[in-house]
Amino acid sequence: MADSLSTAGIIKDLETRFVGQRVICYPSLTSTMDVARQEAQQGATEGTVIVADEQTAGRGRLKRTWLSPRGSIALSIVLHPGVAQLPSLIMLASLAVVHSIETVTGLKSQIKWPNDILIDGRKVCGILIESDVQGSTVNYTIIGIGINVNLRLADFPEILPIATSLSDELGREVSRLSVIRCLLVEIERLYLALSTGGPIYEEWRDNLVTLGKRVRVKTGESVYEGVAESVARDGSLLLRGFDGSLTKIVAGDVTLRE
Ligand code: BTN
C-alpha cells in the first residue's frame, strides 16, 4: 500500500530555508512540470514544490513519456538560478538523488550521463530540467524528479528489462515521505554550495558510471560510438571516437556497450 503524501507531512520541521517551504500535493496530475511552470509564471517563491501521487502524462527527456503510477515519487521544484548556474543543476539534482537514496535505504546508485540514476545498471530515477531563459536572465527553472519507489516492476513489462525500483531492490517498501524530505534538504544544500564553489562538478563526474566505457550516443539525428572519455564543466560529454577524434556532446541519449 502506498504511504500517503501530504503538504504537512513534507513540510513539518523540514530543515531547509526555502526548498520545500511551500509544497502543493495533488492526488493526480497530468505532469508536475506543467503545474510547476504555471506556478512559476505566476511568481511562485523559489523552492516551491509540486508533488503528485500519480501522473497521467508524465514527461521524460527527449520527448519521451514517463510512467509514474501510485507508489512512485513525482515532483517538480521551482528555482531561480543565475544563468551561469544552469549547467550545474543537472549535476546537483543527480547527486541529491544518489545521496538521498543511500541515506534512506542504504542502496548505492550511479549516474549515467547526463542524469539517469541507475542501480546495478537499471534505471531507478529520471530527472528533467526545464528553464525559461531570456537573454542572460533566467525567469525560472524547474527540476522534475521521478523515482521508482514502491513499484513492482513485474507489473510494468514495458520497462521491466531496463528499470528497477527501490522496493524491488530491497524486497520491502520504502517511505516516500522520507525520500522526499531528504531530497529537498540535499537539493538546497547543493544549490547553496554552488554559489560558494562547492565541488559539485567533481563529485558528479566521479559518480558517473559512463566514463571509461564504450558507448553509443544518439544526439538529434546523429549517432556516435566511442569511449566516454570525460565530461566538461558545462556538463557535456567528451567522446573519443575509434578513429581518435574527440566529440563534445551537449545533449543525447547514451547506451552503455559493455
Ligand atoms: C527522464 O529520465 O527522461 C526524465 C524523467 C523525469 C520524470 C519526472 S517525474 C516528475 C516530473 N514530472 C514529469 O512529467 N516529469 C518529471
Image (cartoon, rainbow, N blue to C red):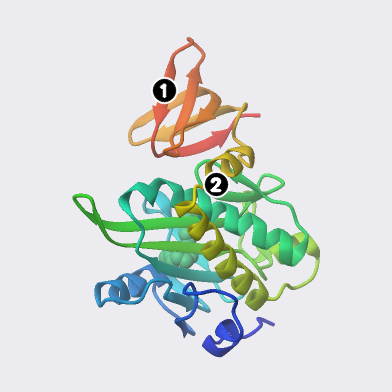
| Front-most of residues 138 and 165 | 138
Label 2 sits on residue: 200
Disc 2 to disc 1: CB gap under 8 Å: no
Query: Considering the numbered disc 2 on the image, is that residue within a helix, a strand or a loop?
Result: helix
Percent across and percent down for residue 130 are 35, 57
**Point 66% across, 83% down: residue:** 3
**Point 55% across, 87% down: residue:** 6
Queried on whether the Cβ of the residue with tag 1 lies below 8 angstroms from ligand 1, the answer reads no
Disc 2: CA contacts within 10 A as few (<14), some (14-19) or many (>=20):
some
Residue 165 visible in the picture? no
Eyeballing the image, is 38 above or below 253?
below
The single residue placed furthest to the bottom in the displayed view is: 8
Label 1 sits on residue: 247
Residue 113 visible in the picture? yes
User: On the rendered image, what quadrant is the C terminus found in?
Assistant: top right
**Point 60% across, 76% down: residue:** 15
The mark found on residue 105 in the picture is none
Drawn side of residue 201 relative to residue 249, left or right: right
Q: Earlier in the sequence, mark 2 or mark 1?
A: 2
- Cα–Cα gap, marks 2 and 1: 23 Å
Which image quadrant is residue 221 in? top left
Disc 1: CA contacts within 10 A as few (<14), some (14-19) or many (>=20):
some
Which amino acid lies under the numbered mark 2 shown in the image of this protein?
Answer: Ile
Which image quadrant is residue 180 in? bottom right
Mark in the foreground, 2 or 1: 2
Percent across and percent down for residue 133 are 24, 55
Which amino acid lies under the numbered mark 1 shown in the image of this protein?
Answer: Thr
| Front-most of residues 73 and 93 | 93
Query: Considering the numbered disc 1 on the image, is that residue within a helix, a strand or a loop?
Result: strand
Percent across and percent down for residue 201 are 53, 42
**Point 81% across, 66% down: residue:** 171
